[in-house]
Image (cartoon, rainbow, N blue to C red):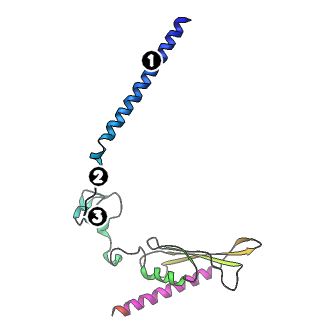
Amino acid sequence: MQPRQGALGAGMAGMARMRTIMVLGLAVTLGAGCSSLGDNVRVPGQDEYRDDSRRAQVRGRIGGSDGIVLLGTDRSRQNPQADSGGVGIGVNAFLWRATLDTLSFMPLSSADPFGGVVITDWYSPPGTPTERFRATAYILGRQLRSDGVRVVLFRQELRGNTWLDVPVAQSTATELEDQVLSRARELRSQSTTAAR
């Protein structure tokens, strides 16, 4: 039995020595990798974000103007009239403004002009404190069209100490949509009159 314990002890000592060598090797490798970090740090140039070169305009493509679009959208084929001024909101401006105007009687919870979503918070009419409403409006495009806005209404009634969901007549949401469209047409009319 003595020889086996000695062999076992020698094997354990060898394993401990091997573990120490591996830990030291890992530490040296990590230290060597971090020592050259200063060469790998990239500092952006002063005018990097204002690059007007042709290469910057086709970023994300392989092979030039007829290449594959990898990330983003193909900006060369967009309709220049649809943008109406470059940087702006992602939906029709008249519908956006009309939606905000129409729903202004309700407290605003969230408004995303690029996604075209307006979410209101709960609103209780002054005459009925046991009833409350919430609206979500979706602006569906960049054109002023009759199907360019959708309004979804939620209604709750207070029963006991809990608010319970109650169905809303579809005509109520449709009436709000019609008010938004009417206001948008009015805003467009004012805009064209002011431009003359």
The x and y percentages for residue 63 are 24, 56
Residue contact between numbered discs 3 and 1, judged by CB atoms under 8 Å: no
User: Given the image, on which type of amino acid does mark 3 rest?
Assistant: Tyr
Please report whichever mark, 1 or 2, sits nearer to the chain's N-terminal start: 1
For the point 54% across and 5% down, the residue is 2
Q: Name above or below for residue 112 compared with residue 67.
A: below
Q: Residues within 10 Å of mark 2 (few under 14, many from 20)?
A: few
Q: Name above or below for residue 115 compared with residue 67.
A: below
Q: Which residue is mark 2?
A: 42
Please report whichever mark, 3 or 1, sits nearer to the chain's N-terminal start: 1
Asked if the magenta segment contains residue 102, the reply would be no
Q: Name above or below for residue 119 compared with residue 187.
A: above
Residue 112: numbered disc: none
- Quadrant position of residue 175: bottom right
Residue 49: numbered disc: 3
Q: Which residue is mark 1?
A: 14
Could you say which is closer to the camera, residue 52 or residue 71? 52
- Quadrant position of residue 128: bottom right
Magenta-tinted stretch: 168-192
